[in-house]
Image: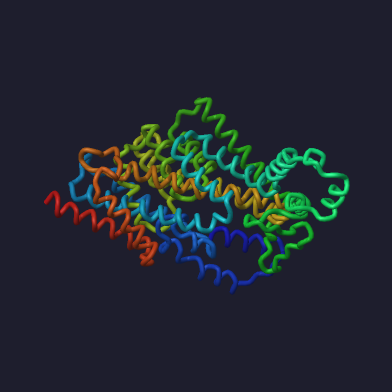
């Protein structure tokens, strides 16, 4: 919604579009409800976000209120509360797994994207350094370019040709050679008809597409004319300059105040996060809990409760920022919440704004769209990584306040499966599935512990 308003006002004040009060009212009418109806984060409700933007502010305010409550509760909670929260976590894992499957159905278009989704999920589980996820995505984008340009295919074709017997070795005379040239066999036809990019590329199913002579036309009403490509480059360059400055100051350690360190950590997280809301959860745990600013118990309590809140999972940074500030003496909790909100959302909004100016130019290049195809497939794989990591910390009770695997108790496996099946085949809404998980957690407590 903020992006829609920004684009609308930019067009008006730049003179490209006259003032239209009806258009602004229509934009507000179509977007206002998302802040209070979108549950589970962008990966869960990707169908909604294909059509509309998300208004994050109402959920951010709600998560700040939650942080104030969590900061004042006792160290140990009643046993039924742990059962409720674990049920919410287990159901959330099922919803995120469902989102991963649905995203995979869109991202997988051929063998390459299937492989990239698989490798993104499996390699993401094995390692979790700060530089690791961006490197995976760069490799995936480069792999898609190599595949679409058929560089490997040509190399294999050349190797096969060199391995085939020549006419002299097979005992054919010169007449046979001329006949072969006049009527090429399957191998010769394969070489002759192999696509030579940029005229042709592989479509992934054995066919080829002519992209050099095909004019890509976009309806005038759908064209992005918000910024020029020069302005887009300036915005992206300014962002990376600010990013480098913040990271250098963070690395030098000359600024020991909680506010700056909190901003730097969340600014870094917002920059390198790919794959949607679920992927941010393990990274936020690394940047906030490992620093000692928020306890593992409070992290898991907030994670469980926030899944029932509207808005994207990035709002979790507001909750963590507030608690991180409350644990220090030099920063009020409200300031920490604002810092968390700005730091986690700014990188995405700024980069999106910059690429709005570049998109019209870059989309004309096949290598760019091929790269995006690979990055998208690998990012979907990272959602499966998030499923695993959430599964490993979802179980909390008196003995495991730092979180443990949901696989410790078969009942939580049932809860996760129920939320997945309910959403997949019975169209159960995400908030209903998560609340059902909480109810199932209470049922287990009533049967086992009561």
Q: Residue furthest bottom?
A: 22
User: As drawn, is 421 to the left or to the right of 165?
Assistant: left
Q: Residue at x 44, y 61 (%)?
A: 35
User: As drawn, is 127 to the left or to the right of 223?
Assistant: left
Q: Residue furthest left?
A: 450
Depth order, front residue of 187/352: 187
Q: How is the image coloured?
A: rainbow
Q: Residue at x 19, y 50 (%)?
A: 80
User: As drawn, is 111 to the left or to the right of 255?
Assistant: right
Location of residue 16 with respect to 287 vertically, above or below: below
Depth order, front residue of 198/300: 198
Depth order, front residue of 21/344: 344
Location of residue 98 with respect to 293 vertically, above or below: below
Q: Residue at x 71, y 41 (%)?
A: 160
Please provide percent x and percent y for residue 311. Answer: 43, 57
Residue 416 visible within the image:
yes
User: As drawn, is 384 to the left or to the right of 165?
Assistant: left
Give the mark count. Answer: 0
Asked which quadrant contains residue 271, the reply is top right
Q: Residue at x 42, y 45 (%)?
A: 386
Please provide percent x and percent y for residue 385. Answer: 44, 44
Residue 346 visible within the image:
no
Location of residue 108 with respect to 74 vertically, above or below: below
Please provide percent x and percent y for residue 219. Answer: 70, 68
């Amino acid at each position: 919604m903020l992006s829609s308003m920004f684009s609308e006002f930019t067009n008006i004040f730049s003179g490209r579009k006259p003032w239209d009060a009806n258009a602004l009212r229509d934009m507000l009418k179509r977007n206002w409800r998302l802040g209070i109806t979108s549950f589970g984060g962008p990966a869960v409700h990707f169908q909604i976000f294909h059509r509309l933007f998300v208004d994050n502010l109402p959920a951010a305010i709600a998560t700040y209120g939650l942080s104030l409550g969590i900061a004042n509760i006792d160290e140990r909670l009643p046993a039924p509360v742990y059962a409720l929260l674990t049920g919410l976590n287990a159901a959330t894992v099922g919803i995120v797994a469902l989102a991963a499957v649905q995203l995979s159905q869109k991202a997988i278009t051929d063998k390459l994207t299937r492989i990239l989704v698989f490798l993104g999920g499996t390699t993401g589980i094995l390692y979790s350094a700060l530089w690791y996820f961006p490197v995976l995505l760069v490799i995936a984008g480069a792999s898609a370019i190599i595949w679409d340009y058929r560089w490997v295919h040509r190399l294999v074709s050349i190797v096969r040709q060199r391995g085939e017997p020549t006419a002299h070795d097979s005992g054919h005379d010169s007449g046979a050679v001329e006949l072969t040239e006049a009527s090429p066999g399957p191998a010769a036809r394969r070489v002759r008809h192999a696509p030579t990019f940029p005229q042709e590329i592989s479509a992934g199913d054995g066919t080829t597409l002519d992209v050099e002579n095909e004019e890509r036309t976009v309806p005038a009403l759908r064209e992005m004319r918000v910024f020029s490509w020069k302005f887009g480059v300036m915005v992206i360059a300014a962002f990376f300059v600010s990013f480098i400055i913040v990271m250098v100051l963070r690395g030098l350690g000359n600024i020991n105040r909680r506010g700056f360190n909190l901003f730097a950590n969340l600014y870094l997280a917002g920059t390198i996060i790919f794959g949607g809301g679920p992927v941010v959860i393990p990274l936020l745990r690394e940047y906030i809990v490992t620093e000692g600013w928020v306890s593992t118990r409070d992290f898991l309590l907030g994670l469980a409760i926030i899944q029932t809140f509207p808005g994207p999972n990035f709002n979790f940074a507001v909750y963590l920022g507030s608690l991180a500030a409350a644990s220090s003496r030099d920063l009020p909790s409200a300031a920490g919440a604002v810092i968390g909100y700005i730091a986690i959302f700014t990188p995405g909004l700024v980069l999106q704004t910059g690429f709005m100016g570049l998109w019209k130019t870059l989309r004309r290049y096949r290598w760019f769209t091929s790269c995006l195809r690979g990055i998208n497939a690998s990012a979907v794989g990272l959602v499966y990584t998030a499923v695993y990591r959430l599964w490993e910390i979802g179980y909390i009770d008196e003995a495991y306040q730092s979180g443990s695997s949901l696989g410790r108790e078969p009942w939580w496996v049932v809860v996760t499966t129920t939320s997945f099946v309910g959403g997949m085949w019975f169209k159960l809404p995400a908030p209903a599935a998560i609340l059902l998980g909480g109810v199932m957690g209470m049922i287990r407590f009533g049967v086992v512990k009561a």
